[in-house]
Image (spheres, rainbow, N blue to C red):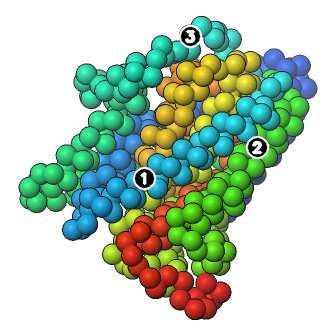
Amino acid sequence: MKLKIHWQILIAMALGVVVGIIFQVIYQGKPTGWVFSIIVAFGTVFIRLLKMVIVPLILSSIVSGVASVGEGKSIGRLGLKTFLYYFVSSILAIMIGLILTNVIQPGVGADIPVGHDFNAENLKTPQSPGEIIIGMIPLNPIQAASSGHMLGIIFFAIFMGVAITKVKSESRDFMKKIFNSFFDVMMKITEYVIKLAPIGVFGLITKTVSTAGLGLFKTVSLYILTILGGFIIHMFLVLPAIFYLTTRINPLLHFKAMISAMITAFSTCSSNATLPVTMSNVEKKAGVSNRVSSFVLPMGATVNMNGTALYECAGVIFISQVLGLKLSLAQQFIIALTALLSSIGAAGIPAAGVVVIFIVTQAVGFKDTDIAAIIGVMLAVDRPIDMFRTTVNIFSDSMGAVVVAKSEGEKNLYPRGAGSR
């Protein structure tokens, strides 16, 4: 238990493979018995715990994040510029994920067990973009929360966050304090749930290997390469292109300035834990004023999740390929829309992407019984993906701060020698 969580997950994964092989050999791919049922229950309980935190985590995260935009005299101008950057960069990340997964098709031919009652006709197919927009607005927010209507919850949370910024100061401060505290509590609960990941991974991998064998890991390797390839394209091509076009500054200066923040993000897998380092690098090495960094970066830790959005989109397409489906353009549209919105509410903690991927799968209409084993395999290899995912997230945040600072007329960006220290 003294080992770091990623080592615990890797050990649990290895044990799951070994135990799964034993069950497969003994029961010829059809394991039974009370020991096997208990081990499988570990994975089921972990998945249920992840689902348990989704609604309150997303609600509190979005409301507190949007409400915090209300601080500062330049809220209108800064807010518009910040959200425009976040929107464009997130959309481009999502498109990269969709294109790569459709072209490479890492899930085609994968032998991962799914629910026996899976029926492609049960998938929700929106008839038009207008229907999607209408469906986002819940008739009853409480009912939307109880039924897991995530798009409705996200819409209501954004609406409430904006409304909080418009009320009198006493009410605004009171509501912000409530939702900030609520969000802190939900993050702590989520951290506790993630600590159970090794036990959950052990159960999920044992079940998967005992029924499908080791052949699935070849497909998982292709899935990992697809996701990491998307991260590389976005971080080293797309973001630098946006950065140069908007600032006319050499992106290499920013890479050098953000080295320590990127290493921290890579090792902690937490945008929130990295935030102090990110702010220090952006202010001291990139030369951005505290007025801009204190506004853009905390918002980015909640709102701007390029890597998470890419991962969610690509992950759901991967799941559909494993299930043998070809999603229509309408279904892929709702995936992109949901990934963008849910990435806004993704908590800046390790493995948060695994939590919110359920939002996207539910929006399309996948049943948990159909995809639990697939997500279990994805979770088992999530640590290296999460390391790169978080690095992409904070790097995009930091670039956004420089882009906004440049548009605000700040001139002392990247003072001589700062980028190389």
Residue name at image x 49 percent, y 45 percent = 343
* Residue at figure coordinates x 41%, y 79% from the top left: 410
Q: Which residue is mark 3?
A: 122
Q: Could you tell me the amino acid type at mark 2? A: Thr
- Residue 309 in the image, given as x and y percentages of width and height: 56, 44
Q: Which residue is mark 2?
A: 226
Quarter residue 261 falls in: bottom right
Residue displayed at 45% across by 72% down: 406
Sooner in the amino-acid sequence: mark 1 or mark 3? 1
Q: CA distance from mark 1 to mark 3?
A: 36 Å
Assign a secondary structure to mark 1: helix
Kindly identify the amino acid type of the residue bearing the numbered disc 3: Asn
Q: Secondary structure at mark 2?
A: helix
Q: Give the amino acid at mark 1.
A: Leu
Q: Residues within 10 Å of mark 3 (few under 14, many from 20)?
A: few
Dot placed on the residue nearer the N-terminal end, 2 or 1: 1
User: Which element type, helix, strand or loop, lies under badge 3?
Assistant: helix
**Which sits in the foreground, 379 or 206?**
379
User: Relative to 126, does residue 416 appear above or below in the rendering?
Assistant: below
Q: In front: mark 2 or mark 1? A: 1
Label 3 to label 2, Cα distance in Å?
Answer: 28 Å
Q: Nearer the viewer, mark 3 or mark 2?
A: 2
User: Residue at 46% of width from left, 48% of height from top?
Assistant: 87
Q: Position of residue 107 (x, y in %)?
A: 77, 29
Q: Which residue is mark 1?
A: 84
Tell which of 25 and 262 is nearer to you.
262
Figure check: 297 above or below 114: below
**In the picture provided, is 227 more to the left or to the right than 23?**
left
**Residue mark closest to the camera, 1 vs 3:** 1
Position of the C terminus, as image quadrant, is bottom right
